Image (cartoon, rainbow, N blue to C red):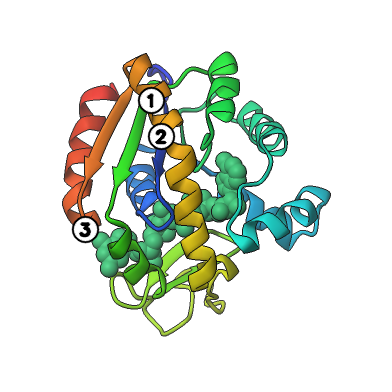
Amino acid sequence: MAGRRLFRALIMGAPGSGKGTISERIVSDFGLKHLSSGDLLRSQILQKTDVGLQAQKYIDEGALVPDETMVALISAELKKLAEHSWLLDGFPRTRHQAEALHKVQPLDTVISLNVPFQVIIDRIKDRWVHLPSGRIYNTLFNPPKNPFTDDVTGERLVQRADDAPDAVRKRLEVYQASAGPVIEFYRELGVLEEFSGSETNKIWPHVRRMLQQRIQ
Ligand code: G5P
Ligand code: MG
């Protein structure tokens, strides 16, 4: 995107609403850098960093990692992306995080996905992931070429600990309690774009069209 104005966006939505899946399509079509707070935390856990060790207990039980930890972690990553257009996925997800980000970097567009919770509960049990890269599969929706194997590296896929039914229920409750004030914050700023539906393939063309109009 050399020579173009930098574009800064966020994709938000409940756990399993398709943020990661749609982010992969946005990255592929529009060339934005993708920064997923969940992928970043899982990579800190794999590397056994202090942040990873602190965050693991919150993540496994489906609770939010404290705001201060998240703001420090994401701010450090965004500094590395200062020269790039980017798409945040999963941060901010509290009003405090949204205000902290707004002070350093206002957003151009916020994509908010509305997917019925029962649809999410049905699809998330079939999710398999390649943890080091964040690549996402689903045994029914987008299966890997070879069962339980990452298409790119050939490594084994795993299921996330927080995709266990109790943790999924908790994550959906947490989203319901914390997302409203974030959505309101971005609506007031005039940057909110909401997309509702049960199928990513039907939501995606609308997201794509909106971004084509915004990214020049
Ligand atoms: P994450 O990693 O941000 P969540 O819970 O917000 O986790 P998640 O689970 O990663 O979100 P997603 O990215 O929205 O879901 O969804 P996805 O992976 O693309 O799609 C879900 C599944 O459905 C996949 O298998 C996909 O293939 C399939 N799928 C997609 N579309 C369709 C479709 O149309 N049909 C069908 N059948 N299937 C489909 O955060 C994890 C944890 O990290 C901490 C928290 O503890 C959080 O719980 N954390 C933070 N804590 C505080 N503040 C923050 N900002 C934090 N960020 C992360
Ligand atoms: Mg995700």
Residue situated in front as seen by the camera: 193 or 36: 193
Residue situated in front as seen by the camera: 47 or 196: 196
In the image, is 37 to the left or to the right of 71? Answer: left
Q: Is residue 173 visible?
A: yes
Tag shown at residue 199: 3
The CA distance from mark 1 to mark 3 is 25 Å
Query: Tags 1 and 2 in contact by the CB under 8 Å rule?
Result: yes
Viewport quadrant of the C terminus: top left
x and y percent of residue 66 in the render? Answer: 69, 41
Query: In the picture shown, does residue 11 fall above or below 135?
Result: above
In the displayed orientation, state which residue is furthest to the bottom: 147
Residue situated in front as seen by the camera: 208 or 124: 124
Q: Secondary structure at mark 2?
A: helix
Within-10-Å neighbours for mark 3: few <14, some 14–19, many 20+: few
Q: Badge 2 is on which residue?
A: 180
Q: Amino acid at mark 1?
A: Glu
Q: Is residue 7 visible?
A: no
Which of the two discs, 1 and 3, sits closer to the camera?
1
- Asked if the residue at label 3 sits under 8 Å from ligand 1, the reply is yes
Q: Badge 1 is on which residue?
A: 184
Tally of marks: 3
Counting residues from the N terminus, which is met first, the one under dot 1 or under dot 3?
1
Viewport quadrant of the N terminus: top left
Q: Amino acid at mark 3?
A: Glu
Q: Secondary structure at mark 1?
A: helix
Q: Determine the image quadrant of residue 47.
A: bottom right
Query: In the picture shown, does residue 125 fall above or below 57?
Result: below
In the image, is 194 to the left or to the right of 37? Answer: left
In the displayed orientation, state which residue is furthest to the right: 50
